[in-house]
Amino acid sequence: MTEPLAFGMGSGLFYIQIPFLTVNNGPAISFRTMPGAIFKRTCKSLGVEVTRKKFSNPAAAEAFLDKKVKEGVPVGCQVGVFHLTYFPKEYRFHFNAHNLIVFGEENGRYLVSDPVMEDVTSLSKEELSRVRFAQGPLAPKGHIYFPEKIKPITQDMIRKGIVSGIRRNVRDMLSIPGNFAGVNGIRHTSNHVRKWRDKLGLRKASLYLGQIVRMQEEIGTGGGGFRFLYGAFLEEAAAYLQDDRVANVSEDFTKAGDMWRASAIKMAGVYKGRLTEQKDFEEIADMMLEIRLVEKEAFQKLSSLKLGK
Amino acid sequence: MKKEDLPQDPGALDKFTREVCYVKNEDGKYETALSKGWDVKKQALDSAWEEVNERVEEARKAVASGEKSPVYYFMELRLMDLPVLSGYTGIFPFFIKRHFKPSVFKGLSERKLEKYARAFDITVDELKNFKG
């Protein structure tokens, strides 16, 4: 099981600008679905039963976690980043959709595997309890999840999971209602970008662009707003399904990822103070529209492949 | 992105961890590679921090001149906004806004001050005696 495969089967690729909500005084934009949802769908298609639990009481949450750790079950926890002690200070914003895995206890400290870190880290009980009950938008509320039953995974299950993952992702990106999510969400943001300079002033507008770049490149893996990760998934999927057409679509996502990165470079010009004109904002907005077209076509291609059930 | 195009600009995570990127190798196949960072990202982060520092500095001045209470300063210092602070203290945003006024802040009960102090990771004395 590899990361791109899990991401694709869980239909991870997405785009949304959540209206009205602001995060760290900037627009709330995401390039993927909620990690809990990706995990849930992937496990479901692999026949793994996952139990998830939220708590209102920190003490009960800790007792439950201790029990599971003693049983030797690795437990996933949703945490807030702000109080996470081993994170470098520069990264500690109030961001609540970070996930880590607790897999043991040693000298009263939990052993933690964090996707950001290359090595194993540890947290004391108070520290973990604090980040598990971080507050703010998307507060984790002690959210934990762990596998209950694991059946042997067959090639056939993986194939089925891939197909349903692709189909669901096509649906999410192309035909989700509303104008602020899916491929249309990119156009929504692009329209906003055009207005930001006049509406917010240059300074705030450039901070907003900085926020987009951070959402695109810092959060999670792969860069290019998860587009490279999805490209890698389609490449693997092509091998599983023995279908070269899927591998061809993978190229389109690589292209989309490259375009996102190109737009990030352009945005960087704005918040570095090199580009200040309205026409620069127009250019960024136009780049986003082009990205939207590339992604839309790619998903339409995926949709027309008729991969079956 | 091609493997040779992967940026290796040392950033905030340098010497601490490296990040995984999915890149195309010479045969046009995806593989993972480790990146030290990317200037574009680094600057996005830096400009976000500049903004934070500026807000904190402005808040400090506002406290020093008697326009705002220390609650406001520490909220900015801890990068919080009203909903987040409300979550940590259990005090409704409407009241928190009132507590930004020095005159209201003066009359706050010990219990409320303690709630704020805990949310900000400081002692009640530090909160009370902050002059900007």
Image (cartoon, rainbow, N blue to C red):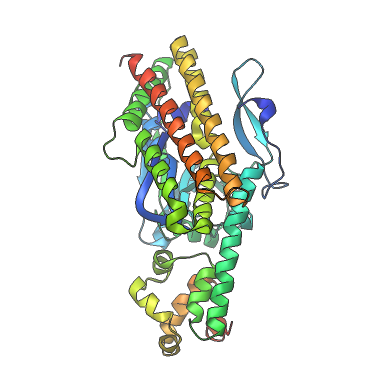
Residue in the foreground of this view, choosing between A241 and A204: A204
**For the view shown, which residue lies furthest in the left direction?**
A177
Could you tell me residue A56's position as x and y percent?
Answer: 35, 60
Q: Nearer the viewer, residue A144 or B60?
A: B60
- Residue sitting at x 44%, y 76%: B115
Q: Is residue A112 above or below residue B49?
A: above
Residue at x 61%, y 24% (from the top left corner)? B31
Tell me how many marks there are: 0
Give percent across and percent down for residue A295.
Answer: 42, 27
Give x and y (percent) for residue A186: 40, 38
Q: Is residue B128 visible?
A: yes
Compared to A55, does A170 lie above or below?
Answer: above
Residue shown at 60%/55% (left/top)?
B47
| A256 left or right, relative to B47 | left
Quadrant for residue A17, please give it.
Answer: top left
Q: Inspect this view and state whether residue A73 appears.
A: no
Looking at the rendered image, the quarter that the C terminus of chain B falls into is bottom right
Lateral position of residue B13 relative to residue A261, left or right: right
Question: Which is nearer the eye, A175 or A259?
Answer: A259
Task: Measuring from the top left, give residue B99's x and y in whole percent.
Answer: 41, 80
| Quadrant of image for the N terminus of chain B | top right
